[in-house]
């Protein structure tokens, strides 16, 4: 009696652990195509377990095992970035991020979004390269970067961002890390993405690399060659975009603002950028390249 009770208890625990792992995997996957692949792979694993345990079919079992192995190798290649990120989280003991409980939700004020957008627009107009990493609660640590940069810990402002990315400053080649309403550090060296190496420059590859590894992290990129504005999010790059489009994207990604006054401020800021873009079009010598349409941009290779 005790033996059968122990067997049933072990089977129950096995079922609970497997179910918990499956729920965790499905809750972390957000893309539909990736979810389909994961469902198909788990179905093959369950089928192989069922055939080995309850059916005496050695040939079928061998074929299914070979299929599971081939699918495992294929998924390891497709998901090499995600698997590397998983190993990093397990190795550093950051289980809160793995379980989907990151740091406190990042909410930027309307003034912060306006300052960041204005700085990106002016850098785009002057064709000065820039890379701004916005941490929205992904628990970024110094060891996540190739070089953590120089600590700044200052209130975010347009003037400070312009000075940090000035060509004659020692920190202009690296990225600026923003968390909340403050600039955490500057001169940060980010890991590069391996996708489309021949298509993008170093800044864009760095933006793709950090957003591939951290889904609660976005990057604003300004091309030094053409002044094109871009926004990287979850390993995808949207470019070219205008200053007003960048403002809308930042408002959506960084969270909707609760107070009506904040909405009024964001609307007035958007109108201000629309006015600046119109003024730039009226004066060809001061054209904001970030506001041009994709067809008017020449093919560029960003630094």
Image (spheres, rainbow, N blue to C red):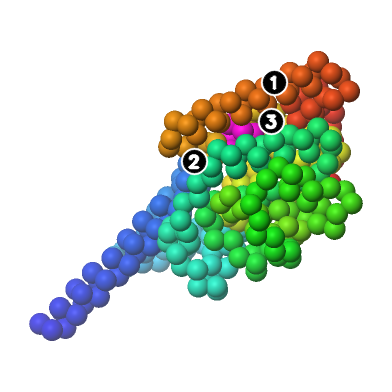
Q: Residues within 10 Å of mark 3 (few under 14, many from 20)?
A: many
Which residue was labeled with disc 1? 275
Q: Is residue 212 visible?
A: no
Name which residue lies at 84% across and 37% down.
Answer: 127
Which of the two residues, 109 or 97, is positioned nearer the viewer here?
109
Residue 243: assigned label? 3
Residue 182: horizontal and vertical position, in percent? 61, 53
What range is drawn magenta here?
Answer: 246-250
Name which residue lies at 52% across and 36% down.
Answer: 252
Q: Relative to 190, does residue 156 appear above or below in the rendering?
A: above
Residue 255: assigned label? 2
Name which residue lies at 55% across and 73% down.
Answer: 91
Element class at badge 3: helix
Q: Which of the marked residues, 3 or 2, is nearer the chain's N terminus? A: 3
Tell me the chief SS of the magenta region. Answer: helix
Element class at badge 1: helix
Which of the two residues, 157 or 203, is positioned nearer the viewer here?
157
Which of the two residues, 219 or 262, is positioned nearer the viewer here?
262
Q: Residues within 10 Å of mark 2 (few under 14, many from 20)?
A: some
Element class at badge 2: loop
Badges 3 and 1: C-beta atoms under 8 Å apart? no
Q: Alpha carbon of mark 3 to alpha carbon of mark 2: how far?
A: 18 Å
Residue 269: horizontal and vertical position, in percent? 61, 29
Quadrant (top left/top right/bottom left/bottom right) for the N terminus:
bottom left
Q: Residues within 10 Å of mark 1 (few under 14, many from 20)?
A: few
Name which residue lies at 40% across and 66% down.
Answer: 58
Nearest-to-viewer mark from 3 and 1: 1
């Amino acid at each position: 009696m005790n033996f059968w009770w122990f067997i049933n208890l072990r089977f129950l625990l096995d079922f609970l652990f497997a179910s918990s792992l499956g729920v965790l995997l499905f809750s972390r996957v957000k893309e539909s195509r990736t979810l389909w692949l994961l469902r198909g792979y788990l179905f093959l694993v369950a089928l192989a377990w069922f055939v080995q345990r309850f059916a005496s079919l050695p040939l079928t079992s061998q074929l299914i095992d070979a299929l599971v192995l081939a699918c495992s190798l294929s998924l390891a290649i497709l998901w090499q970035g995600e698997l590397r990120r998983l190993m990093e989280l397990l190795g550093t003991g950051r289980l809160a991020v793995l379980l989907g409980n990151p740091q406190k939700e990042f909410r930027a004020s309307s003034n912060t979004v306006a300052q960041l957008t204005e700085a990106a627009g002016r850098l785009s107009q002057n064709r000065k390269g820039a890379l701004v990493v916005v941490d929205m609660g992904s628990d970024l640590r110094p060891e996540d970067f190739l070089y953590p940069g120089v600590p700044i810990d200052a209130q975010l402002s347009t003037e400070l961002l312009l000075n940090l990315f000035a060509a004659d400053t020692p920190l202009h080649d690296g990225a600026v890390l923003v968390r909340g309403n403050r600039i955490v550090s500057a001169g940060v060296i980010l890991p590069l993405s391996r996708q489309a190496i021949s298509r993008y420059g170093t800044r864009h590859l760095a933006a793709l690399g950090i957003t591939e590894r951290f889904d609660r992290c976005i990057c604003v990129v300004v091309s030094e060659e053409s002044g094109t504005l871009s926004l990287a999010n979850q390993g995808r790059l949207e470019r070219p975009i205008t200053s007003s489009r960048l403002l809308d994207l930042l408002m959506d990604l960084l969270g909707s603002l609760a107070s009506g006054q904040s909405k009024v401020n964001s609307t007035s800021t958007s109108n201000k950028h629309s006015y600046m873009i119109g003024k730039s079009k009226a004066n060809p010598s001061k054209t904001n390249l970030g506001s041009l349409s994709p067809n008017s941009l020449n093919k560029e290779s960003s630094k």
